[in-house]
Image: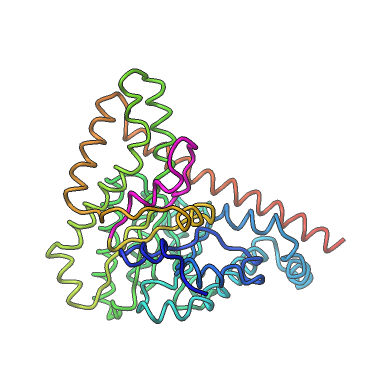
Amino acid sequence: MTQNTRTQALSDAGVSIWLDDLSRKRLLTGNLADLIATRNIVGVTTNPSIFQAAISGSDEYDADIARLAGEGKDVDQVIEVLTTDDVRNAADLFADAYAASKGFDGRVSIEVDPRLAHETEKTIAQAEHLFEVVGRENVMIKIPATKAGLPAITAATAAGISVNVTLIFSVERYEGVMDAYLTGLEQAAKNGVDLSTIHSVASFFVSRVDTEIDKRLEEIGGEALALRGTAGVANAQAAFGKYLEAFSSDRWNALAAKGANVQRPLWASTGVKNPEYSDTLYVDQLVADPSVNTMPEKTLEAVAEHGEITESLNAETAVSAAATLERVAEAGVDLADVFALLEKEGVEKFEQAWAELLETVSASVEASRA
């Protein structure tokens, strides 16, 4: 099998392609292995919604649920085994990519319990627990970029854990995330941790920004309508400008001299929600070196079929993007309110998905004990 020319071009441009999905079916059927071989997939991200869909929509977990229930495990323990088993097996599948990229890729992410999003100490404890349970160097622990999440990111990084920071919506919060990572690296260095073993990505959500801002622009009407579909890309492009600043600073250079790795921006929520927009919009317009784009399979296949690689983002792109966001604000959109709402909704959606997963597995556990 050979790699698709368009996904290969994206990889050659400095974008690591990670699949935004994981299920036991993908592992057992060889689907994930095929995507690695033909679509340049070099990593996987998961979240509570992905696990809820995988486990509730398949009978491939039933035998394990029955076995674990028979061992007396409660529902939370059963879910932990199911999810960490899938992540561990996927991590093994990416072992070659992990070795070839010296740890940047070949990564599989698993998220801390979304119910802990506003509890720093419990998030730290679970990040350490999941890292130990999965037991693979190439696992990344996802921690949300809530205010309570920032110190947890620092603590996990200081402990030598590679972190995927999730649910970032604003450039301002992204700056806080990068600071949390750098602080964690500084603490790790003081603790004698080998900085070269620590990697991180910062997941900046894209399509949800357009969905909310477009709705507000439509309520305003008139000339504001011309700005629809521009904010999501501009927000991410502006964020990349902040990445360039942070990882060329004296503070960063001091850490790089000790072997530290950059925290790459990761473009998340890249499936296009509005059918009026190009289905590869959040890939074509966010080519950045270095970066990660985590795509649902539908978007991945669209890119393989007709994606168009554009010029890589740079400092000038960021300036233009900031001007676009300013026009959106001048049109009457309260950006701070948008980003606060999206973070709140993001946490709530993952909490709801986790509650549904608990309900699904609970029913299966009870049925197996009947």
**What residue is shown at x 24% (from left), y 42% (from top)?**
321
Give the side of residue 13 with respect to residue 270, left or right: left
Where on the picture, by quarter, is residue 364? Answer: bottom right
Give the side of residue 331 with respect to residue 46, left or right: left
Question: Closest to the observer: 210 or 12?
Answer: 12
Q: Main secondary structure of the magenta part?
A: loop
**Is-magenta flag for residue 270?**
yes
Question: Closest to the observer: 81 or 248?
Answer: 248
**What residue is shown at x 50% (from left), y 69% (from top)?**
38
* Numbered range of the magenta stretch: 268-288
Q: Horizontal and vertical percent for residue 220?
A: 36, 20
Q: Horizontal and vertical percent for residue 221?
A: 37, 19
Q: Horizontal and vertical percent for residue 266?
A: 37, 57
Q: Is residue 274 above or below residue 82?
A: above
**What residue is shown at x 37% (from left), y 26% (from top)?**
217
Q: Horizontal and vertical percent for residue 341?
A: 42, 36
